[in-house]
Image (cartoon, helix red, strand yellow):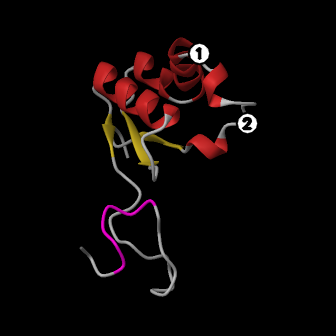
Amino acid sequence: MPNKLIYTGHFYGFSWSVPSWNQVSYEQFKKKMFNTQTFVRGYGYPYLLGEFGNNQRDIPWKYVIQYLQETGIDWTYWCLDGFKCDPDKDETYGVFTNDFQ
């Protein structure tokens, strides 16, 4: 369908094989995000960061938030609820806890 294409990506700090996030500068992060995901915007295609999340405000979290603020990229967050597929298992990335508090 014409004009209905959107590119999407994911970002989780644990999914990048880096020796230590303390050794990754924001400029390196930004370059990799552009080269591996968001470069499509330069061709006129929309891009959505379709999934990202974290359970602490560490370096990857700070970098992705800064990148989103600088670029104005639309995004969705993983995840809203506080449990995994099994309600007895905690989803530590959830905005809410298991009891939706």
Label 2 sits on a secondary structure element that is loop
Q: Earlier in the sequence, mark 1 or mark 2?
A: 2
Question: For numbered disc 1, what is the local secondary structure?
Answer: helix
Q: Quadrant of residue 24?
A: top right
Residue in the image at 30% along x and 68% along y: 96
**Residue 32 lies in what quarter of the image?**
top right
**Residue 6 badge:** none
Q: Is residue 96 magenta?
A: yes
Magenta segment includes 9: no
The image quarter containing residue 93 is: bottom left
Residue assigned mark 2: 17
Q: Which residue is depicted at the point 32% across and 64% down?
A: 80
Magenta-colored segment: predominant secondary structure: loop
Q: Position of residue 50 (x, y in %)?
A: 42, 47
Q: Amino acid at mark 1?
A: Gln
In three-dimensional space, the C-alpha distance between marks 1 and 2, rounded to whole angstroms, equals 13 Å
Per the rendered image, the range of residues in magenta is 93-98
| Residue toward you, 6 or 100 | 100
Mark 1 lies on residue: 28
* Residue 83 coordinates in the image, percent (x, y): 43, 76
Q: Is residue 82 above or below residue 52?
A: below
Depicted 73 relative to depicted 14: above or below: above
